[in-house]
Image (cartoon, grey):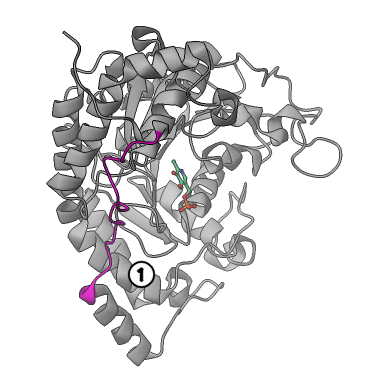
Amino acid sequence: MTRRVSTLAIDGGAPVRQTPFPDYVSIGEEEKQAVMEVMDSTVLSKYLGTWSPEFFGGPQVQRLERDWADHFGVKHAVTVNSATSGLYAAMGACGVGPGDEVIVSPYTMSASATAALVYGAIPVFADIDPETFCLSPESIRSRITPLTRAILVVDLFGHPADMDLIMDIAREHDLRVVEDAAQAPGAKLRDAFAGTLGDLGVFSLNYHKTIHTGEGGVVVTNDDDLADRVRLIRNHAEVVVKKKGTTDIVNLIGFNYRMGEIEAAIGREQLRKLERLLTPRLDAAAYLSERLRDLPGLSVPVVRPHVKHGYYLYALKYDESVLGVPRATLAAALKAEGIPMFEGYVEPIYLEPVYQQRIAFGRDGFPFTYPGYRGHATYDRGLCPVTERMHYRELLYTNVCHANIGRSDLDDVVAAFRKVYDNHGALASGLQSGTTHDLSAER
Ligand SMILES: Cc1ncc(COP(=O)(O)O)c(C=O)c1O
């Protein structure tokens, strides 16, 4: 018996979803009020780049740092003006420099790898785990050389990396671990928050994140010395160290990574809302996974045992050999039905010009060509096969799991998937006869 199916929107039918999905909004009256109080105080920043009480910033900055440290159960929280700044400061605090290698993920926002480059170290890309998309401990192990100084791990899409194994490897080889938890505020491994599992952790407070201050970031650590060094790098270290009495001045060239009082005041309100904003993400993801998990060739996000996911993004895997419909066609058909669905995440970082052409600082290829670098890092296509398979063939993601999304929105996502799946024969045969879509334009 043939099943009657409605015409796909990509073939001229009516789309499942006729209106845009609601945007994510985490800012409300509390933040507005907090900003007005800072305005009334007239103190928009209190930093001074000298060794003085003002070296640590103004009252809002210091309060946010205390709140953040309490909430995440760490000794030190150091605010910065972005997670990028935080990653750079964390890498600097670890003491990496020219001639060193830092193992990084190729599947993340570019700054996670650039953090090594800015200190003249060489990023060495390890491959990712095909279930969590975070760095694979086995691949990390295979990339360790006598030059390795640190590992920069990313909790991608909000799922904490395999930190137990990664910390074991790091201790075995005496390596520092920076955990990039930009996408994972509130995620957990057992009772510990993502971001607190390495030597240093970095959170982002940029506009796209679960909680935000417009731009901003926080570095956390339980290590007094690392915290001290991050604070110095944040605030003009080179002119502070003498008066402060710091004698180990390696990497203590400072920047201005300071957060303003307005952002800090917003950050305090956002932190208070974190759990309230996170729970709907988990609920939405569970709702979708429950309804999509039986679709052939589709794998819903994996949540490893003892993990609380942060669901910054909801990432699926798709095996096109099962239906005979390429990922690009599936994604195009879902988009035509009105569903925000994206193929792959970011291009594997080692394929960016900075690594392909080995040009970072100056004209001579520093740090790749630094004579003191004795290693052999490569950046050829094929370097991280799992990452490339995920990016170019399997991964699909949507950003609809958040607090402003309702059940009926999620039902539209499910209905669109079901409709496209019900029509997979037409999609596949359209491909063969060439009557459906121009795939070259979708690739
Ligand atoms: C994994 C990861 N690391 C670092 C960053 C950088 O964050 P920021 O924009 O706060 O500098 C981002 C931002 O999207 C990110 O997703």
427 over 69 or under it: above or below: above
Q: Where's residue 28, x and y in %?
A: 24, 71
Q: Quadrant of residue 36?
A: bottom left
Residue plotted at (49% across, 24% down):
391
Horizontal side of 107 relative to 293 (left or right) equals right
Report the front residue among 327 and 431: 431
State left or right for residue 195 relative to residue 271. Answer: right
Q: Name the residue at the right extreme.
A: 363
171 and 426: which is toward the camera: 426
The residue under the point 26% across, 13% down is 296
- Residue 341 visible here: no
**Dominant secondary structure of the magenta stretch?**
loop
Residue 135: image location, x then y, percent = 42, 24
Residue 303 lies in quadrant: top left
- The amino acid type of the residue labelled 1 equals Ala
Q: Nearer the viewer, residue 166 or 51?
A: 166
Question: Is residue 154 one of those drawn in magenta?
Answer: no
Residue 24 among magenta residues: yes
Q: Position of residue 248 (x, y in %)?
A: 58, 49
Q: Which residue is mark 1?
A: 264
Please provide percent x and percent y for residue 293.
19, 21
Residue at image location 33% in from the left, 17% down from the top: 424
Eyeballing the image, is 314 above or below 406? Answer: above
The quadrant the C terminus occupies is: top right
Q: Residues within 10 Å of mark 1 (few under 14, many from 20)?
A: many
| Residue 85 visible in the picture | yes
Indicate the secondary structure of the residue bearing disc 1.
Answer: helix
State the extent of the magenta-drawn residues as a range.
12-30
Could you tell whether 88 is left or right of 60 in the image?
right
Query: What quarter of the picture does the N terminus occupy?
Result: top left
